[in-house]
Image: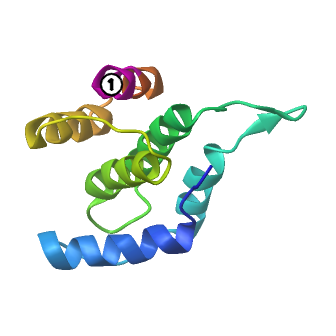
Amino acid sequence: MILLTSQEIISIHSKLIVKTGGLDGLRDIGLLESAVASANNAFAEVEQYPTIEEKSARLAFAIVNNHSFLDGNKRIGILTMLMTLKLNNVKIAYTQQELIDLGLSIADGTYKYDNILEWIINHRY
């Protein structure tokens, strides 16, 4: 299973901001590291999020909600989810509007982890 590191996500965020606009920079590295670590949570050696779909959903939820970056938290949260799925050969089909709606729903609290996981599962092909 291939997962992005905090440093890789920071680099991707900088490139994303250059391309789409906004403020580059990290507000709190600890919050980003917490978001990344949360996808690998385990208790008694049993992973809380064992599948790549579950890890991707957890990453999107945690990155968007932790507000680790000065700007673009929704964008980087969704992009991290998409990249994690792609790196692990999970194919999903979506429109740009669906991604926008997903990011907004996570940010406003309408979508929780379970909703994001369901979204991923429903968009697989």
* Quadrant showing the C terminus: top left
* Residue 38 vertical placement versus 46 (above, below): below
Count of all numbered marks drawn on residues in the image: 1
Viewed as shown, does residue 95 lie left or right of 25?
A: left
Viewed as shown, does residue 9 lie left or right of 100?
A: right
* Residue 21 vertical placement versus 113 (above, below): below
Kindly give the residue lying farthest to the right in the view shown: 44
Residue interval drawn in magenta:
118-125
Q: Is residue 120 located in the magenta-colored stretch of the structure?
A: yes
Coordinates of residue 121 in the picture (x, y in percent): 39, 23
Identify which residue is drawn at 17% across, 72% down.
22
The chief SS type of the magenta part is helix
Question: Is residue 26 visible in the rendered structure shown here?
Answer: no
Coordinates of residue 95 in the picture (x, y in percent): 12, 38
Question: Is residue 105 visible in the rendered structure shown here?
Answer: yes
Identify which residue is drawn at 40% across, 50% down.
86
Q: Which residue is mark 1?
A: 119
Q: Secondary structure at mark 1?
A: helix
Coordinates of residue 117 in the picture (x, y in percent): 43, 26
Identify which residue is drawn at 49% across, 33% down.
53
Residue type highlighted by circle 1: Trp
Q: How is the image coloured?
A: rainbow
* Residue 96 vertical placement versus 123 (above, below): below
Q: Residues within 10 Å of mark 1 (few under 14, many from 20)?
A: some
Q: Is residue 116 located in the magenta-colored stretch of the structure?
A: no
* Residue 88 vertical placement versus 118 (above, below): below
Identify which residue is drawn at 39% across, 20% down.
118
